[in-house]
Image: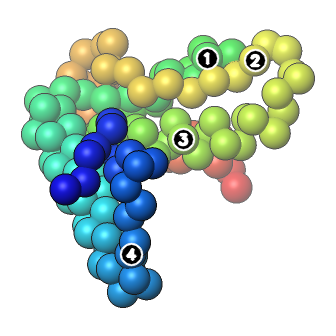
Amino acid sequence: MLELLEGRPTERVPLLLTPRMKDAANAMADRREQNLSEWLRHQIAKASEDVMWAVHVEGPDDIVARADYAAALEMATDLNDYYNRFKDSEPAIVAKVIEWPFSEVGHGQELAKGEDYGREGK
């Protein structure tokens, strides 16, 4: 019988896995991680259906409407990846996902513009 310590076999009992067993264990772990990611995405989408989302770009203090949480998260991630190249600049620029702080009409108007932040005129 294997003794477990924090989910791992103790040193007293060596655990021998064949390459095939290792591959099967890794595949199972990958499926669990993928299932968890899908479940989390579903929960976020479900919880945010009635929320108007935006990205707050701190530094220039811009607020940009996004259609849903996933779009806001993607935009904030992309902007932060871009701005991280200029870490030493002042003021620091950071993009964060927020709830739209203005009216529903304003959110709809902002979305209808269809412009990508920072790409106007390109």
- The circle drawn on residue 17 is 4
CB contact under 8 Å: marks 4 and 2? no
Q: Pick whichever of labels 4 and 1 is earlier in the sequence.
A: 4
Q: Secondary structure at mark 2?
A: loop
Query: In the image, is residue 14 above or below residue 7?
Result: below
Q: Residue at x 38, y 64 (%)?
A: 15
Q: Measure the alpha-carbon separation of dots 1 and 2.
A: 8 Å
Q: Measure the alpha-carbon separation of dots 3 and 2.
A: 15 Å
Q: Secondary structure at mark 1?
A: strand
Query: In the image, is residue 23 above or below residue 97?
Result: below
Q: Measure the alpha-carbon separation of dots 4 and 1.
A: 51 Å
CB contact under 8 Å: marks 3 and 4? no
Q: Position of residue 80 (x, y in %)?
A: 63, 36
Task: Name which residue type carries label 3.
Answer: Thr
- The circle drawn on residue 77 is 3
Q: Secondary structure at mark 3?
A: helix
